[in-house]
């Protein structure tokens, strides 16, 4: 991290970090969207006027404000305005509906709720009214944002260790968990990302994921530390988004493994011609990265790929660095920054450091999540190499126990990702009276690929050296794997539910 970024990272609060950057480079752009540009100076000025408007509505330091908004400049302005006030923010992913939104509003005890109105054909204001939300207001565009005189505002918050953020886990198998963060934990996470990627003020980043995701502030902190802009995508789809990447000269893109695969698919339509000429780096995290994906990106796209490890509870844990070795970039999640402690207990990755959340809204969940030494139990399995790199080997709940033998789903997935007839794959354990669990591979094939058979898959896996007791007993080929709407993680619980009945004849 350069000296300026390092000095800025010591800011106690997100608002103080914003003020310092606005003083350094007021006229440099920070957010780009379509034909609009917001500078660092405008970010500070407009967020403060919006904060005054919110104050006039009754929002005070400590007031809980939930917001369910798409990735837009106005969303960022609202979030920074709330940070200026010292309110407690509860961002909600815009694709969530009654069950998740209602749960978040009730559990956070939100006193205000900002929505986009009708967005992508869905009436979020009607959703809010139906749920009995308090203080509902629309905040999709500048015309609907409240405005006021900053001179009437109370002093900004000075303490960065007070909980002012409630983020929500995905809640794919049960109710979501409300994750408690402070300004300092978010700044620590963003600093880790910035430090690892070796970016400069000449770069142009991109946000193709929901701003309401924990990656939103993670990425924004990096922009404030280094003083470069990012392109916002309200709706991300390829190839439609490519024109914006090219127009703004994006140098850093990504999001998660699914995003890498989407860019690769576009690159394969025009081999030998860079799909985004200015691009030099793909970066992301949030889901496992098979080594073959790394090699394919570097080989076919001609750019570097660095992958990291993060979660809602700890937005950035480790990150690969562009100057790392090929072996480490392909097979590890990178190294932790200074101040992030990793401990492996019975194979489980546990964490302690400034970027770790303060726990959950539910005290019982907090007590269960942390061990006696204050380390967060992640539920991920892994090991640390001699060079300090973290290798993830799977999830505690993703270990398949077949006839008493532990089988890593990730090991099989990594091998199958290298098969030319496999576009993506999820390996799951299914109940079986004889074995306890059987191994099932669910495969998404690329266009034009020859149809796979179980015999062909297992012959390939055995040729790759996979132990006989780990080869799948069942194969399912699907048009598309089920994914969430944030970082497009595969929803394995849906596959387990779908295929837990008797196998179909193939």
Image: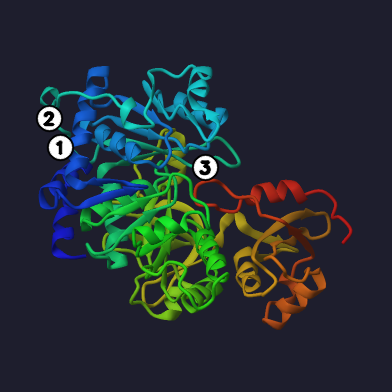
Residue 5 position, x and y percent, is 18, 59
Task: Name the residue carrying label 1.
Answer: 158
Residue 397 x %, y %? 60, 54
Q: Which mark is residue 170?
A: 3
- For this orientation, the residue located farthest to the right is 505
Judging from the image, what secondary structure is the residue with disc 1 in? Answer: loop
Instruction: Return the mark for residue 155.
Output: 2
In this rendering, position of residue 102 left or right of residue 199: right
Mark pair 2, 3: CA separation: 35 Å
Q: Is residue 368 above or below residue 288?
A: above
Instruction: Identify which residue, 288 or 25, lies in the foreground.
Output: 25
Q: Nearer the viewer, mark 2 or mark 1?
A: 2
Q: Is residue 373 visible?
A: no
Q: Nearer the viewer, residue 271 or 478?
A: 271
For label 1, count other residues whose C-alpha is less than 10 Å away and answer few (under 14), some (14-19) or many (20+).
Answer: some
Mark 2–mark 1 Cα distance, whole angstroms, equals 9 Å
Secondary element under disc 2, as helix, strand or loop, is: loop
Quadrant containing the C terminus in the rendered view? bottom right
Is residue 280 at all visible to an observer of this figure? yes
């Amino acid at each position: 991290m350069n000296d300026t970024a390092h000095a800025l990272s010591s800011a106690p609060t997100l608002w103080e970090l914003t003020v310092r950057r606005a003083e350094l480079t007021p006229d440099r752009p920070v957010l780009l969207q379509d034909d609009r540009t917001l500078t660092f100076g405008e970010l500070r000025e407009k967020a403060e006027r919006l904060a005054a408007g919110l104050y006039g509505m009754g929002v005070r330091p400590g007031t809980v404000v939930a917001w369910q908004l798409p990735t837009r400049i106005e969303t960022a302005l609202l979030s920074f305005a709330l940070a200026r006030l010292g309110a407690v923010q509860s961002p909600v992913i815009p694709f969530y509906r009654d069950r998740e939104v209602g749960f978040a509003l009730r559990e956070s005890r939100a006193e205000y709720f900002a929505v986009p109105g009708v967005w992508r054909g869905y009436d979020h204001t009607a959703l809010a009214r139906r749920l009995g939300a308090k203080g509902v207001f629309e905040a999709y565009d500048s015309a609907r944002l409240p405005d006021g005189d900053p001179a009437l505002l109370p002093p900004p918050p000075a303490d960065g260790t007070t909980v002012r953020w409630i983020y929500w886990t995905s809640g794919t198998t049960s109710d979501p968990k409300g994750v408690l963060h402070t300004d300092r934990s978010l700044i620590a996470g963003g600093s880790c990302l910035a430090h690892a990627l070796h970016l400069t003020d000449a770069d142009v980043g991109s946000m193709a994921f929901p701003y309401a995701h924990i990656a939103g502030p993670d990425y924004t902190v990096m922009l404030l530390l280094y003083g470069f802009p990012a392109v916002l995508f309200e709706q991300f789809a390829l190839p439609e988004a490519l024109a914006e990447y090219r127009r703004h000269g994006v140098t850093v893109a990504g999001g998660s493994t699914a995003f890498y695969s989407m860019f690769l698919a576009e690159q394969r339509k025009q081999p030998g011609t860079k799909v985004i000429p200015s691009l030099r780096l793909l970066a992301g995290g949030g889901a496992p990265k098979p080594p073959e994906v790394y090699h394919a990106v570097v080989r076919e796209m001609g750019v570097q790929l660095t992958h990291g490890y993060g979660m809602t509870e700890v937005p950035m844990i480790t990150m690969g660095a562009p100057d790392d070795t090929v072996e480490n970039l392909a097979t590890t999640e990178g190294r932790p920054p200074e101040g992030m402690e990793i401990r492996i207990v019975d194979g489980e990755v546990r964490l302690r450091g400034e970027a770790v959340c303060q726990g959950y809204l539910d005290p019982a969940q907090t007590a269960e999540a942390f061990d006696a030494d204050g380390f967060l139990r992640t539920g991920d399995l892994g090991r640390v190499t001699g060079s300090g790199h973290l290798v993830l080997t799977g999830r505690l709940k993703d270990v398949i126990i077949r006839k008493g033998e532990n089988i890593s789903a990730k090991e099989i997935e990594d091998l199958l990702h290298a098969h030319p007839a496999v576009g993506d794959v999820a390996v799951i354990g299914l109940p079986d009276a004889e074995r306890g669990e059987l191994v099932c591979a669910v495969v998404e094939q690329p266009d034009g690929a020859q149809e796979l058979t179980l015999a062909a898959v297992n012959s390939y896996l055995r040729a790759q050296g996979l132990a006989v007791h780990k080869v799948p007993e069942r194969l399912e080929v699907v048009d598309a794997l089920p994914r969430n709407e944030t970082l497009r993680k595969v929803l394995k619980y849906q596959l387990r539910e779908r295929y837990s009945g008797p196998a179909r004849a193939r």
